[in-house]
């Protein structure tokens, strides 16, 4: 029992270091999932967390002349280290997936519950943006894009969006907005989108502690064969 307790004491300090990249990536994934800009601060934090996690994944041996030098123990130790890295990656994937699903669920509920702000917009500068690919490698119908211009509180915004057919310059339409009127919303999410993202977020919340426990267990197991 005392040896098992010692292993637990050694494992848990390593787990936060191995989980640092997952935690540091939370604000980046949240912003990315909502198409918002990411500042330099979170990116530098992610870089530092990756360095910490990489350093923690390198488990030092016990020195020459010890039982750790036995070939069987070295092989088991290498396998344990690989399992530790694998569960650290899975933990990051679980955390980031949960954050992404949660951000989508929050955004979907907000859009569904609250009618987006709408303003009049003027369509200008419609142009051909390309052609649709067809089977056999040929080119199909043309694709178009138009620039929408609108004003919110005296400030003008613009954004190019794909359209089925080009409009004449000066054509007036009404558009939905988000992010304080800075971005257009081309459509509202369906009624099933919110439950879908909520279920994924809950599954992610269940996966995170499981992955954390498995990571700690693999760290303890790897320490046994060092």
Image (cartoon, helix red, strand yellow):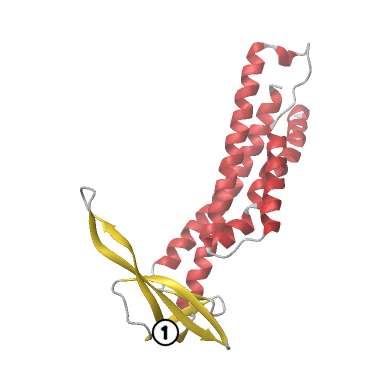
Question: Which residue is nearer to you in this view: 5 or 97?
Answer: 97
Give residue 211's quadrant in the image. Answer: top right
Quadrant containing the C terminus is top right
Disc 1 element: strand
Quadrant in which residue 219 is drawn = top right
Give x and y (percent) for residue 29: 58, 56
- Image vertical order of residue 126 relative to residue 54, above or below: below
Left or right, residue 156 beside residue 217: left
Q: Position of residue 97 (x, y in %)?
A: 53, 53
Quadrant holding the N terminus: top right
Point out residue 32 in the picture as x, y percentages from the top left corner.
Answer: 55, 60
In this rendering, the answer to whether 53 lies above or below 119 is above
Q: Position of residue 36 (x, y in %)?
A: 57, 65
Q: Residue at x 27, y 64 (%)?
A: 142
Residue drawn at x 73%, y 30% is 4
172 versus 25 height, above or below: below
**Residue occupying the point 62% across, 27% down:** 80
The answer to which of 75 and 39 lies nearer the viewer is 39
Task: Check disc 1 and report the residue beneath it.
Answer: 122
Q: Residues within 10 Å of mark 1 (few under 14, many from 20)?
A: some
Location of residue 155 (image quadrant): bottom right
């Amino acid at each position: 029992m005392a040896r098992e307790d010692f292993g637990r004491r050694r494992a848990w300090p390593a787990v936060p270091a191995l989980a640092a990249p997952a935690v540091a990536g939370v604000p980046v994934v949240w912003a990315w999932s909502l198409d918002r800009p990411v500042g330099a601060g979170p990116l530098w934090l992610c870089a530092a967390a990756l360095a910490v996690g990489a350093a923690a994944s390198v488990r030092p041996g016990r020195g020459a002349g010890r039982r750790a030098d036995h070939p069987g123990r070295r092989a088991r130790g290498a396998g344990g280290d690989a399992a530790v890295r694998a569960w650290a990656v899975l933990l990051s994937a679980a955390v980031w997936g949960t954050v992404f699903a949660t951000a989508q669920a929050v955004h979907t509920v907000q859009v569904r519950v609250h009618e987006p702000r709408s303003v009049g917009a003027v369509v200008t500068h419609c142009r051909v943006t390309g052609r649709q690919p067809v089977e056999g490698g040929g080119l199909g119908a043309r694709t178009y894009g138009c620039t929408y211009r609108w004003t919110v509180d005296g400030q003008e915004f613009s954004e190019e969006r794909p359209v089925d057919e080009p409009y004449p310059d000066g054509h007036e339409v009404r558009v939905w907005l988000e992010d304080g009127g800075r971005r257009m919303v081309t459509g509202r999410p369906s009624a099933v989108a919110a439950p879908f993202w909520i279920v994924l977020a809950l599954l992610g919340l269940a996966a995170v502690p499981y992955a954390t426990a498995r990571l700690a267990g693999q760290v303890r197991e790897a320490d046994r064969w060092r």
